[in-house]
Image: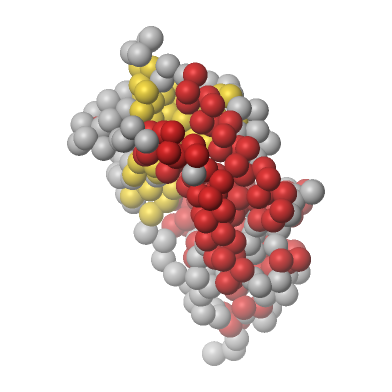
Amino acid sequence: MNSPGKPGEIRQVKHMSHSSRETLERCAKSWFLKYMAKAPQRPALWSAGGTAVHEVTEWYDLMALNGKADIATSALGGTWETLFGHQLAKIREKEPNENAWRKSAGDSVAAWNALGPELVQAYIDWRERSPWEIWTTPDGEPAIELDVGGMLPGCPVEIKGYVDRIFHDPMFDRLVILDLKSGKRAPKSGDQFGAYGALVAQKYGVTAHLGVPFMNRKGTVGRAYELAEYTPAAVGAVFGAAWKKVQAGSFPATGFPGECFICDVQAACAAQNGPLAHIYDPASPGHPSNDPP
């Protein structure tokens, strides 16, 4: 989560990511408020829970690589409690009132304390039966929460990216990019995996052939996406086009009304009559940029 900006302050963006480009395409106003106006983001309980799932599975895989999988499994409950507790502390610092947090139906801290370890265990069970192995980069780094950020042709700014896992499939001798999904929705396209694949190719000179989500709630991988079309040049061109939109400086509210409830900066949006719009949204008559000279 970002630190709120000063009233009327517009910050320059120096990089992009898959998630930021996705936000830009979905609603330019939301992107502007989040990344340039630095409007405060309303915390989400599902985000805290999902982040903790990522952290605990990362911890497990690192322990397993060091021959300590049994120790990790036995300590799963305490590790979840600690890491989820850290995530809750972060969002409580931002918003002490838990009733103001964004939540899904049936969401609660107690529910996540029951669900979280189950989602982690589902991943562990899959890892134990899967023949896939954690890939090691040419630099000797295990591909666990791997930083693949860098430059791509056609885009003048850095594209940041962290890959949850890259596996080597020994049966077909290919690399597979995997992203953990603690929610119920599966990806609608292979774009996220394609962006990571292009960055991996640019940084390491290797080809990732497939991208797959691991659907924690189902305990297995979802639809696999072929990544051949996502070359560094093709992905760089997409991000370059997005950057041109940023440079054009027009950020209309283009989100579908039914999706606005998931927006974490809705309170700062003039199109939604947000109570903070006069502080962060230049489209609001009360915004400092509209003050007479």
Please report the residue visible at 72 percent of the width from the left and 49 percent of the height from the top: 111
Residue occupying the far left of the picture: 139
The image shows residue 200, relative to residue 58, as above or below, that is above
Residue occupying the far bottom of the picture: 293
Please report the residue visible at 59 percent of the width from the left and 61 percent of the height from the top: 88
Along the line of sight, the residue nearer the viewer: 137 or 36:
137
Give the x, y percent position of residue 98. Answer: 71, 66
Please report the residue visible at 49 percent of the width from the left and 19 percent of the height from the top: 129
The image shows residue 28, relative to residue 205, as above or below, that is below
The image shows residue 38, relative to residue 77, as above or below, that is below
Please report the residue visible at 37 percent of the width from the left and 39 percent of the height from the top: 62
Q: Colour mode?
A: secondary structure
Please state if 70 lies on the left or on the right of 122 as rendered. left
Q: Quadrant of the C terminus?
A: bottom right
**Res 214 → quadrant:** top right
Give the x, y percent position of residue 182. Answer: 60, 39
Give the x, y percent position of residue 159. Answer: 37, 47
Along the line of sight, the residue nearer the viewer: 92 or 118:
118
The image shows residue 147, relative to residue 231, as above or below, that is below
Give the x, y percent position of residue 119. Answer: 60, 37
Residue 4 visible here: yes
How many marks on residues? 0
Please state if 134 lies on the left or on the right of 92 as rendered. left
Along the line of sight, the residue nearer the viewer: 225 or 291:
225
Residue 155 visible here: no
